[in-house]
Image (cartoon, rainbow, N blue to C red):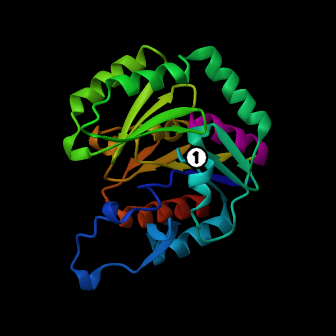
Amino acid sequence: MPVLVASDLDRTLIYSAAALALTMPDARAPRLLCVEVHESRPLSYMTETAAQLLTDLGDAAVFVPTTTRTRKQYQRINLPGPEPTYAICANGGHLLVDGVSDPDWHARVTARLADECAPLAEVQEHLLRAADPVWVRKHRVADDLFAYLVVERELLDEDWVKELAVWAENRGWTVSLQGRKIYAVPKPLTKSAAMREVARRTGADLTLAAGDSLLDADLLLAADRGWRPGHGELADTGFTAPSLKALPDRGVLAGERILREFLGAVAGA
């Protein structure tokens, strides 16, 4: 039976220059591979060692990139290794099969959102009204499923984020602060539901997952085994579970460690 590996990407397997956390002397820094270019500029990296580990993982398991990114944002990433058959985008709103969104899955997700939480338009309107232009750089909507703000983090009032979380909770939404982005995401829009669907389609009897943010918590709890790095929202809040291993590694080296953990678990299956 195949092993399914569903992993978050940003700040879990791939890292922006600001998130690399290269604390070692320059001469001992790992060699890096650029895996994403945006507007002709390098944007995301992994270590060359991690790139080889991911290639090995793609040969040994069903690797499923699992991200809150939109389809367009995901498709500019050029991961090493075999092209994944499945990918989960927009926090579970789109299930890509050979690069194309499965229309039946998307229809099921949107029907559930309509039934179970406040509409996107209400959340958009609240963000436009309540967010302070002093620290908001951009208002964005992702694939007509959820909203996020790009902010000046050093100017952000974090109490405002807590107040937004309470407001959203009462409407069936959740809030996540990741770097310079504040996400507002419907609670029924989950990575875990999409992971379970891929497990059903592939017949996988063991699921492995990794992630660093609040939006990965449901994925980690749904998997048979999970890992989180030593940075990010989950580490900051001390998130834990019986099937979860909290790693001490931070930054781009955490991505390398997570891939080693995946490969070890696949080999032991």
Tell whether 122 sits left or right of 104.
left
State whether residue 120 is above or below residue 157. Answer: above
Toward the viewer: 7 or 257?
Answer: 7
Residue 90: give x, y in percent of width and height: 58, 41
- Determine the residue positioned at 60% across, 33% down: 144
Q: Main secondary structure of the magenta part?
A: helix
- Determine the residue positioned at 35% across, 66% down: 17
Residue furthest to the bottom = 27
- Determine the residue positioned at 53% across, 22% down: 121
State whether residue 20 is above or below residue 240. Answer: below
Label 1 SS: loop
198 drawn magenta:
yes
Tell whether 229 sits left or right of 52.
left
Q: How many marks?
A: 1
Toward the viewer: 44 or 156?
Answer: 156
- Determine the residue positioned at 69% across, 65% down: 83
User: What residue span does the magenta drawing correspond to?
Assistant: 190-202
Quadrant assignment, res 223: top right
Residue 84: give x, y in percent of width and height: 69, 60
Question: Dot 1, crowdedness within 10 Å: few (<14), some or many (≥20)?
Answer: some
Q: Amino acid at mark 1?
A: Thr
> Residue under circle 1?
70
State whether residue 159 is above or below residue 36. Answer: above
